[in-house]
Image: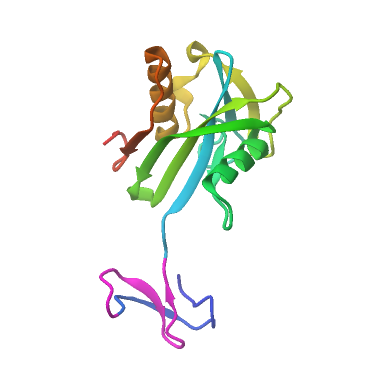
């Protein structure tokens, strides 16, 4: 950040009084500009023995597979964000279930929240951010072409829980690339 979004003056990176982290502070009006993690929300959508997956039409990871998910908007709940992102990316109508995975990604300042959901009907098609939207069985998932580690983690937890016959909330921190802890 170079300029204040409040008055347009230059900002400096310094620790404000009473704080312990450097923040961008306006040299003119004194506004402190806090930067916080981004929240990504989506759904692992079931239809019979298949999962709804999307092949990305945007960067990052163009052409790779993911669950319908994206950045949460201001003034919406995480559940509303999951419903919206599933409509936007796969044109799908879903019944939203319980939160399934909560993944911290501190190295990119993001939190990923994925809900379980069921597809209401087969009337879906890819949105602008997806090349494809399709239902895949576990054996059909292109595991080497999964776009994000949080999606890989969510899928593996889902299929393991399905084999056990009991679903629970899974949490992890993907602190460094290439690891689940």
Residue 44 in view here: yes
- Most frequent secondary structure within the magenta stretch: loop
Relative horizontal placement of residue 20, taking residue 54 as reference (left or right): left
Q: Residue at x 46, y 74 (%)?
A: 2
User: Is 57 situated above or below 137?
Assistant: below
Visual colour scheme: rainbow
Examine the image and state in which quarter residue 31 appears.
bottom left
Q: Residue at x 49, y 78 (%)?
A: 4
Relative horizontal placement of residue 12, taking residue 45 as reference (left or right): left
- Residue 40: x and y in percent read 49, 45
Which of the image's four quarters has the C terminus? top left
- What is the total number of numbered labels drawn onto the structure image? 0
User: Is 105 situated above or below 50?
Assistant: below
Q: Residue at x 29, y 41 (%)?
A: 176
Which of the image's four quarters has the N terminus? bottom left
- Residue that extends furthest to the bottom in the rendered view of this protein: 28
- Residue that extends furthest to the right in the rendered view of this protein: 123
Residue 67 in view here: no
- Residue 165: x and y in percent read 41, 15
- Residue 42: x and y in percent read 53, 38
User: Is 114 situated above or below 80?
Assistant: above
Examine the image and state in which quarter residue 179 appears.
top left
> Looking at this view, is 134 or 160 the one in front?
160
- The residue stretch that appears in magenta: 17-34
Q: Is residue 14 magenta?
A: no
Relative horizontal placement of residue 105, taking residue 31 as reference (left or right): left
Q: Residue at x 38, y 24 (%)?
A: 157
User: Is 77 situated above or below 170?
Assistant: below
């Amino acid at each position: 950040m170079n300029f204040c979004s409040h008055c347009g003056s230059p900002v400096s990176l310094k620790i404000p009084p009473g704080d312990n982290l450097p923040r961008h502070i306006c040299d003119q009006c004194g506004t402190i500009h806090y930067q916080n993690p981004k929240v990504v929300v989506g759904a692992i959508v079931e239809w019979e023995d298949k999962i709804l997956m999307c092949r990305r039409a945007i960067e990052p990871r163009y052409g790779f597979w993911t669950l319908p998910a994206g950045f949460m908007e201001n003034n919406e709940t995480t559940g509303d964000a999951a419903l919206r992102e599933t409509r936007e990316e796969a044109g799908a109508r879903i019944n939203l279930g319980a939160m399934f995975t909560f993944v911290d990604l501190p190295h990119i300042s993001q939190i990923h929240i994925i809900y379980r959901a069921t597809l209401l009907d087969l009337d879906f098609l890819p949105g602008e951010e997806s090349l494809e939207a399709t239902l895949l069985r576990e054996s059909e998932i292109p595991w080497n072409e999964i776009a994000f580690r949080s999606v890989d983690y969510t899928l593996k937890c889902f299929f393991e829980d399905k084999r056990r016959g009991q679903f629970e909330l899974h949490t992890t921190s993907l602190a460094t690339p290439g690891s689940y802890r």
